[in-house]
Image (spheres, rainbow, N blue to C red):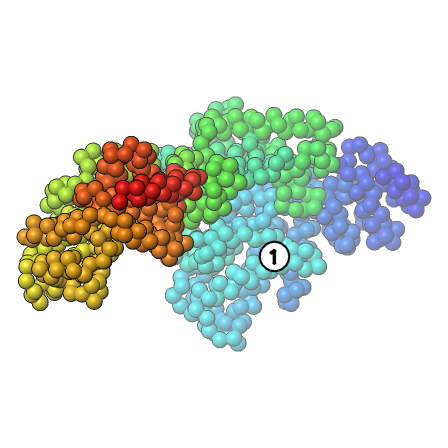
Amino acid sequence: MNYLLEKLKSEFSGKWQELLSYVEENSERLPNARRALIYLEKLHAALNGEIPKELDGEFLYHLVELFSASRFLADFLVRHTELLPKLQSIYRKKFLPAEFELEFSSKEKRAFMDEVRTFKHLHMARVVLRDILNLAPFQELVRDVTLVHDACIKAAYRFAYSQLVKRYGEPTSTFVVVDMGKAGGFELNYASDIDLIYVYGSRYGKTSGGSYGVLHNHDFFELLAKEITELLTARTSEGICCPVDTRLRPNGTMGPLVNDIEALEQYYTAVARPWERFALLKARPSVGDLTGTGIEFLKLARAFVFRKYVDISLIEEVLRLKEMIKAKVRKKGEKIDLKLGLGGIREVEFIVQAFQLIYGGKFPYIRSRNTLIALRRLFRWGFLNREEFEELRDAYLFLRRCEHMLQITEFRQTQTFHPESEEALELAKKMGFPDREEFLKELRQVMERVNRHFNRFFPTGDRRTLSSFTAEELERMGFKEAEEVKRFIEVLLSLRSLLPEERSRLDTFGDRFLHLLLTTPSPLTALKNLTLFLESEEGKLFFFSYLSHENIVRLLLYLLSTKEFFIKRFRETPELLDHIFRPDLIEGGVSEKVFCDLFKELKNLRLTKNVLEVIALLRRRLGRTEIEEFLSEMTSVCDGVLGEVYRELSPSFSLASLGKHGSREMNVGSDLDLLFIAPSPELKNTELAVKLIERLEALGYEVDTRLRPFGEKGELVFTADYFRSYLKETARLWERLAFTRFRFLFGNLKEEVEEAVREFLFGTPLDSETLQGILSMRERLERELGRKEPLKYGAGGVVDLEFVSYTYQLYSQRWLGNTLESLKALAEEEKRFERGIALYRELRKVETEVRLFGSPITSADRIEELKREVRSFYTEFVQWMKSRV
């Protein structure tokens, strides 16, 4: 700076030297003395060293103050020295609202935009000068800023409207621009975007026509809104007039840019969310048809914003919004955020707005768009005591001035700065502090006072809203797919099926919801399915009815974390929600008798099936059953369905099953291997068998009849004599293994058929040749299917234990059917095989988890080790068998 000062002293003369001396004498006080010198040099060059006679000395010194405070305004004034006399004539004057009118002369778009920007920047120079020279109080300054912007919007509206009317003619409806946020409350920032909503009267009608043709009202006003926005936001040689934010309109960026009164009424009545009440609290029609469409809009807004009762539910929305802000602030690290930080401007605004929204319906005299006026009214009517009022008022004024002084340097919308930066030192000087440390000490004390009041009004404790969690935080909590989880949380909170109050309740459930979600086997699947669940009226009603019962929510999220098991059954029969948490069913267990009793009560076969399958899974989740009991209960449900369908059709054939249903080990998604055995050949039996299969498949079962004699080439329904003959003369070794799981279900042929199967299984003792055939069969399955389904057919897969069961039954001549029962019998005979029981249970758990959740959960880290242990068990069993046959 010293070098520049000496340089200018050698170049300047006359009054210019006095200005240099002023800078030198006040260098410690001026926010940025070097900037003042730089722009004095630029002004000297722009004026060719000649100060116009009409510029008096005092104004020039004030201009130095302005140059020191704002690079942006200094740059503007140096470019437009012709405006300096105008600025001198207006900066000491208090304006009336009418004096902000912008009478533009340009008819060409680019020239008009430059004219508007010049008007705005000149008047902002006036406001900032009045501020830094303490010529006006805060409320007058922000009122003037708002009126300057209103004048620009009005000019843009008039310009755009006149252009569009020439092209399309006059519309049959009227239009209004609604200021939102601080502009609505006449408290706009120096460098702020303006939040606007564009509204028109009615969509019904067309323009009168012009050189470009005719448009429907909506299309005309949409063009008008776009044009106004562009006129204000497009960058010209004079920069932009002001950023425009239209996201506060109905449905945000997803909604139309303009809305008519009818559309707004529908939206605010049924769709709008709680936070929009905060936004509309400050809504103010500013340009256009203020007495017609503007009044209609205000009636709608007030009906939505203010309730006729004391609305305590808004407290949760305040907390939710505050937690969202906290999440944003955390990302800014060590920077101080004057607006969103703890004890910042937004906390004062939240206190004021929340009081108005909660109590303003019943006590209309506390309403005001303006924060300071509202604060005064809250104090006057007893909602705040004197200490609360004065501390909040003084803090608000201090913080807003800090914000303004921070923004005027570059006229950039910012509220953050680093406490150790040069920016902080400049801000301290602008605020009248001798050094940075004193300023920061005062700032922290002010913000601590605000935060103390906020926490007293809205005690948050450790609660966090759901929407406030970042992906990084979710990952630290333990979510493996944190980015996807975050995305689905956002989807969940924006569901159109949810009412605003419901969204708010879910959001404020917050971290408690996340902790419950983490207990599920698949949190991401649970979230995806919850979105589907909440799209139905039944699901939504159930969820929000039990939201305060965390144990119920935990179980529901567990069910939703299954890939399709629960959500499929729920969508088929939503009424199952009335029954799946019934204590009598959960504690009583699932059996064929329970199925029959429930079916008599519900009189709906699909509903009964779905309820009891879910009950079986819940019993497993609650630890009421071991894995083998779960498989048995799933089989009992199937037995119940088969029994009802069989009785309904009343066929003359008997019904039997093989596979996992036959051995009572049905898992999620297991198919049904059925056999139809008749006393004599009848065409009608085949028709009834087909009907039975179709009925079962309609209920969600996959029926497989390929285990009948000669498979797909054989008759679907065959006689008992034919069956006995086939088993005796034609059946192959693999069928002998399969029939160890044979179970007779219904009909009159039980003794005859079971005798035939028993003879088939045990008529010939197990010999070494048969054993070798069994081993070869197992090897072939592993070779052909092991890679495709490693958990089932691969080395150490489920089939290893099933082959142990088949082989042991043939060897011991004991028809046990069930794999676990076979392993238990084996362990009784040979103690060293006891470990097979535990291996079976663990492998079945893994298989069930994969079917339910898509991947193993409890044993995920030891799958390969488990398979090695199973293969070792299988190998040892094979050697033992070889020594005995």
Image coordinates of residue 248 in percent, x first then y, are 48, 50
Left or right: residue 686 versus residue 383 is left
Image coordinates of residue 383 in percent, x first then y, are 44, 28
In the displayed structure, 158 sits above or below 382; it is below
The amino acid type, in three-letter code, at marker 1 is Thr
In the displayed structure, 237 sits above or below 614; it is below
- Residue that appears at 47% across and 26% down: 456
Q: Considering the image in quadrants, where does the N terminus appear?
A: top right
Q: Residue furthest right?
A: 10
Image coordinates of residue 734 in percent, x first then y, are 25, 55
- Residue that appears at 80% across and 38% down: 33
- Number of other residues with Cα within 10 Å of mark 1, as a class: few under 14, some 14 to 19, many 20 or more: some
Disc 1 target residue: 233
Q: Nearer the viewer, residue 342 or 144?
A: 342
In the displayed structure, 672 sits above or below 37; it is below
- Residue that appears at 72% across and 48% down: 72
> Taking the image as drawn, is residue 568 in sight?
no
Q: Nearer the viewer, residue 649 or 506?
A: 649
Q: Nearer the viewer, residue 337 or 868?
A: 868
> Taking the image as drawn, is residue 840 in sight?
yes
Number of numbered discs on residues:
1
Left or right: residue 536 versus residue 688 is right
Left or right: residue 873 versus residue 109 is left
Q: Considering the image in quadrants, where does the C terminus appear?
A: top left
Image coordinates of residue 467 in percent, x first then y, are 46, 41
Dot 1 lies on which element? helix
- Residue that appears at 24% across and 34% down: 829
